[in-house]
Amino acid sequence: MSNSADANDSTATLEVVNRPEDGRYELLRDGSVIGHAAYSLNGDEITIPHVETDPALRNQGLGSALMAGVIADVVERNLSVVPVCPFAAAYLHDNPDLAYLIKR
């Protein structure tokens, strides 16, 4: 799961990596962790209680890049999402094409 870098650094490579042993997805920029999304699995439901990016790098779209990677994996694994974190919930709300993923 990789994405293009943000407009502020066109040479950086962003990648979202699932770390199931740690219960989180990590957002990497050129191999360094700059954000993470905690999660827990219960059957075919993934609960996302917390999403965080490096405070020094906020307002660069990195949280959205992280969530895009998480959602790509969720779709691939045919999971439904319980977005406890306000940012995760807002991301899904702001992308109505993803509403079908939300556990009701």
Image: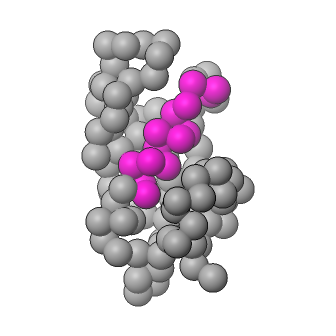
Secondary structure, magenta segment, majority class: helix
The chosen color scheme is one colour
The answer to whether any part of residue 49 appears in the image is no
Give the percent coordinates (x, y) of residue 90: 68, 53
**Which of 87/7 is in front?**
7
Could you tell me which residue is drawn at 63 percent across and 82 percent down?
104
Q: Nearer the viewer, residue 54 or 76?
A: 76
Question: Farthest right residue?
Answer: 86
Residue 72 figure quarter:
bottom left
Q: Is residue 104 above or below residue 86?
A: below
- Horizontal relation, residue 88 to residue 67: left or right: right
Q: Splitting the image into 4 quarters, where does residue 60 fall?
A: top right
Inspect the magenta stretch and tell me whether residue 62 lies in it: yes
Bounds of the magenta segment:
58-71
Would you place residue 5 above or below residue 3 in this image? above
Provide residue 93's location: percent of width, then percent of height. 66, 57
In the picture, measured across the screen, residue 3 lies left or right of residue 24, that is: left
Number of marks present in the image shown: 0
